[in-house]
Image (cartoon, rainbow, N blue to C red):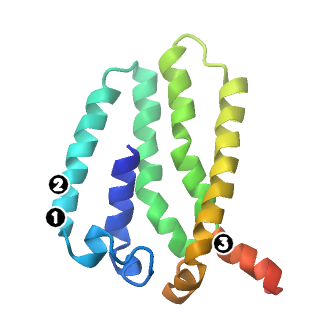
């Protein structure tokens, strides 16, 4: 599903990726592949994901399917909040919850599953902020928001 999320992100961000040095050579941004081709490839990924998901119990199917909203919304977060990395953490670490529901069908130990999930969210927030620092100047020019900009504002005295 991570690949599906990356495809969705690249489809949403074609125009932004063209403005960022590190991403302007991505296949969609560079025109190497067309959006229709990416959508077809996305369909293949989602079909395989659905095949795997249907092998799980019903509660896990519901938990897994509910992650699709997060996956689809993540690329929009960098347009509306300076905290898209936090939303990415919520999205990327959903598998921790899904894993528990898939393995333990009679009683999910939420007192263990939720802290595991939230620690993954925090870790993603940290590493993706570090990763975003390399694009900070291009992102600011392109109007992309991120926690890297928040960090910059704190040190610059604007936050």
Dot label at residue 40: 2
Mark 2 and mark 3: Cα distance apart in space: 33 Å
Mark 1 and mark 2: Cα distance apart in space: 6 Å
- Seen at 72% across and 34% down, the residue is 115
Quadrant of image for the C terminus: bottom right
| Picture coordinates of residue 56, whole percent (x, y) | 38, 20
- Seen at 81% across and 80% down, the residue is 155
Q: Which residue is mark 1?
A: 36
- Seen at 52% across and 66% down, the residue is 77
Q: Is 17 placed left or right of 31 in the picture?
A: right
- The residue tagged with tag 1: helix, strand or loop? helix
Q: Is residue 159 visible?
A: no
Q: Which residue is mark 3?
A: 148
| Picture coordinates of residue 2, whole percent (x, y) | 41, 47
Q: Is 77 placed left or right of 5 in the picture?
A: right
Q: Nearer the viewer, residue 40 or 20?
A: 20
Q: Earlier in the sequence, mark 3 or mark 1?
A: 1
Q: Earlier in the sequence, mark 2 or mark 3?
A: 2
Quadrant of image for the N terminus: top left
């Amino acid at each position: 599903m991570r690949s599906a999320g990356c495809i969705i992100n690249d489809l949403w961000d074609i125009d932004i990726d063209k403005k960022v040095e590190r991403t302007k050579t991505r296949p969609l941004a560079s025109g190497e592949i067309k959006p229709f081709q990416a959508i077809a490839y996305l369909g293949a990924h989602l079909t395989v994901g659905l095949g795997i998901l249907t092998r799980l119990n019903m509660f896990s199917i519901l938990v897994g399917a509910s992650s699709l909203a997060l996956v689809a919304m993540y690329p929009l977060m960098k347009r509306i909040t300076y905290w898209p990395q936090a939303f990415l953490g919520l999205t990327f670490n959903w598998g921790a919850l899904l894993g528990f529901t898939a393995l333990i069908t009679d009683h999910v130990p939420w007192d263990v599953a939720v802290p595991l999930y939230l620690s993954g969210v925090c870790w993603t927030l940290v590493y993706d902020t570090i990763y975003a620092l390399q694009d900070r100047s291009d992102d600011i020019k392109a109007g992309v928001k991120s926690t890297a900009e928040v960090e910059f504002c704190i040190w610059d005295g604007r936050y």
